[in-house]
Amino acid sequence: MRRERFKSLILVVLFIISILQVGIIWNNEDHSSPFYFVTKYLNIPQARPERGTVDEADLGAGAKQILLNPFRITLCTGDEHYTVPRSSEEFNKIKETVFLLIEEVMGGRALRKDIEQETWNSLVSRKSILFEFDVPIPLDAVKWAIDYYNTSSDAPENVWKILVIPRESSGVGFYVLTSRGAIQFAPKSVSMSSLEKLYSETLTATDANNLNTIEYSTIHEFGANSYPGFRGDVMGAIFGRKSTLFRNLKSSVLFFVRSAELANTVLGDDINSYSRSNESGADMMIYKNFSNLYRFYSNGIMEYSYIPSVVVQDKGDVYSALTHALVFVQRIKNGLLDEPELYLSGISQDEASWQFTFDYIFGDFPVFFYHELKMMDEVVIQENAVVIRANDKRIISCKWALVDIYFGNDIKELNTAFDTIDVTNISRMSVDDISIVYYFDMTGDGRKQSGGDINQAWPVWRIEDPEGGRLFIPLREASKK
């Protein structure tokens, strides 16, 4: 009797194992053990990973370089403003100096004093270095990036722009512009002599006498009364040369020439757990398993979705979401794209997740994309290189323009003077920033205009309003004499 019971028990165990095996095979999932399938099927919560125990050993340094990568660094001589070349050694020295000063400010070791916006506009015109992010970086994200959490109550709530004046009275001038106003700090960690040396070396690196170096002035300097809706520190080319030589920028799609590398890098060690299918002829590759869905479009867009439902309770704090986002972004970026650089261009949240946007910079120019994705009866427009949603547990979704970017051989002379911007009543607009960028149209018609799988772009004006809206206006070709 006991023997029969033992046989029955063995049969029950074998029956359960067979169900698990069928489930795993049915979903084409391979996670080294059947327990992953069990937890998904029964909705058993998995253990939460400890913060910082990600599987990327170089997350800290690499993440800081992306998260705190400036949109632009400019140098002011007291009369003119010049963009600091990103390829210069001085550009990296400025970044490291600013990171050091930020840590001092966060720790409350630098005295704080709030100042008026008009004072900030005047200070930007002094002999100084201006370090700008594309958007205000929240305090929590800055703490995460520099790995410094014991912040004082005097720390700024976010960091948008940083102004360093090498010599001001008896010390270094250090100012932080936030989304709410400007703050003066009195730091001690960097000496006047070292900053004056860095300033001098940076001025040499900008090569202000080069015919292709654009000379800028701020709205505050040349006509704030004529542009009442403009921020005073918006820069435009007013004096000096009215035109500049530019090369065309090209992008090629990884989908066709590097498809095997693309799939292996994005899917990683779990690639064998995915089923593959093609849709719309050869214009889309789809990889799917129990939890994850990847679509690779022939125009270069990669779309990822986490299939199971997401619960509000898993939102968590920005630290965990940033960790997941940066691990995902760095792994793909380091595996596929030596260039261009990535920088953080937006942070937002809803009730269940955090959303981060990242954009490209190639050479000294930001690069943007226009892409339309039809979802049911809705057309979703994306102009960022990367849009990624994450929570405390995982990546939820991602859309990424995965393309190779390189300069072409064609050259045009384009007008860079502020008064050549082809916008009606620009003086009546509300403007936070104007910059020269490259802009790719990744829709079907846009790609056909360039021919084949290689798209090209010429510089355009990017005009950004206080709500984050963007207007892209082509630069006019200079008239030939």
Image (cartoon, rainbow, N blue to C red):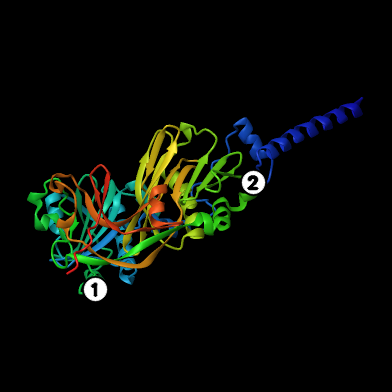
The residue positioned 56% from the left and 53% from the top of the image is: 263
Q: Give the side of residue 57 with respect to residue 369, left or right.
A: right
* Closer-to-camera residue (249/350): 249
In the rendered image, which residue does mark 1 sit on? 207
* Closer-to-camera residue (332/282): 282
Instruction: Inspect this view and state whether residue 207 appears.
Output: yes
Residue 273 tag number: 2
The residue positioned 44% from the left and 49% from the top of the image is: 400
The N terminus: image quadrant: top right
As drawn, 267 above or below 216: above
As drawn, 275 above or below 176: above
Q: Earlier in the sequence, mark 1 or mark 2?
A: 1
Residue 375 tag number: none
Amino acid type, residue under disc 2 in the picture: Ser
Residue 401: horizontal and vertical position, in percent? 43, 51
Determine the secondary structure under disc 1.
loop
Residue 428: horizontal and vertical position, in percent? 13, 44
Determine the secondary structure under disc 2.
helix
Q: Give the side of residue 34 with respect to residue 50, left or right.
A: right
Amino acid type, residue under disc 1 in the picture: Asp
